[in-house]
Amino acid sequence: MGASFIKTIRPAAVGLVAVGLSTPPAVAAPLSPAWQACRAADPDARIKGCTVALAHAEKEPKQNRLAAYVNRAGAYQAKGDHAHAIEDYAKALEVDPSSAVTLTARGAAYQAKGDLDAALADYNQAVLKDRKSAAALLARASAWRAKGEPDKALADIEAAAALDKKTAAPLLARAHHHQSRGDHDRAVADYSEALKRDPRAAAALVGRGASYYAKADYDKALADLDAAVKADPQNAAALINRANAWRGKKDYAKAKADYEAALASKPDLAAARKGLDDVTKLLAQKTAAGAASGVERP
């Protein structure tokens, strides 16, 4: 087919860093400026607000102290400062050692830092403390996958799917598992079920489109990837997979346009750069062949 599809499903632990960010203080009075900032979307503003709120932590109820530490940890992690995130998650666990949610979030920070053993230790504790936490199981599955243990990953994904019958998350994780092992029929089936649960799930559209591409079903791939790009024109994974599908159909001009759009969104995307170089050469060859065929021989 000339180009490999781009996998789009991130490890389940990714996204858990934001856990608790919307947790409000337990007080009934209006939020102070510090507490409002401690819930801000901007990481820097959140760190500053939570730090001010924690300056008087001894006077705050347990729920408020937990929220402030977790919110600040999430902000640090969003900035890529995993060390400070882990420190704050540890402080949150001093406040509430039984919090499976905080353990899962700290595990995600360890995983982002590359310490898979520490991540697994936290995920294991989270699963023990909350046997019904599909999020902890999916996070642990992502760590098993990163360690090259696909069977253990699948076992956790199946357990999560048995617990969570409503969200798309376990179906997306299982689809990614099947896709990574080249079982695109099962991947398509799970992506399709995920879309029934969440019709706007871009990861499911891109993932299913990538599997259709791998099956050389380019028209179905384009239908999914068109929908993903329409929802988010800056979705680099959707753009590069659509470029691959156009390339499969030998429409090199459209492939070139999508590779260029993917690079505009993510300039360091090596797969898009290589794809663009390849189709540029193919277009040049096509132009040269056309010119040669038009030359009248003596």
Image: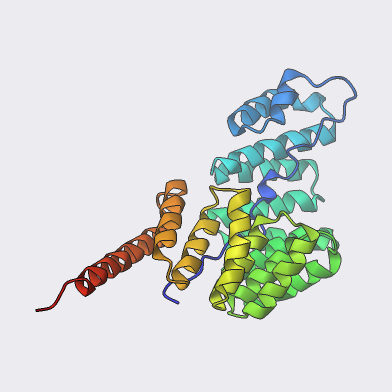
Identify the colour scheme used: rainbow
Viewer-side residue, 25 vs 212? 212
Q: Position of residue 46 (x, y in %)?
A: 65, 30
Q: Position of residue 225 (x, y in %)?
A: 59, 60
Quarter of the image holding residue 169?
Answer: bottom right
Viewer-side residue, 111 vs 188? 188
Where 22 sits versus 156, above or below?
above
Residue 114, can we see it? no
Where 294 sits versus 112, above or below?
below
Instruction: Name the residue located 73 percent from the left edge and 68 percent from the top edge.
Output: 192
Instruction: Name the residue located 62 percent from the left edge and 27 percent from the top edge.
Output: 45
Q: Position of residue 134 (x, y in %)?
A: 79, 61
Q: Quadrant of the N terminus?
A: bottom left
Horizontally, residue 93 falls left or right of residue 203, namely: right
Horizontally, residue 164 falls left or right of residue 234, namely: right
Q: Quadrant of the C terminus?
A: bottom left
Please tell me how many numbered marks the rendered image carries: 0
Instruction: Name the residue located 84 percent from the left edge and 60 percent from the top edge.
Output: 166
Viewer-side residue, 221 vs 251? 251
Instruction: Name the residue located 72 percent from the left edge and 71 percent from the top edge.
Output: 190
Viewer-side residue, 46 vs 187? 187
Residue sitting at the far left:
298
Q: Position of residue 254 (x, y in %)?
A: 44, 60
Where 20 sits versus 220, above or below?
above
Residue 159, can we see it? yes
Residue sitting at the far right:
28
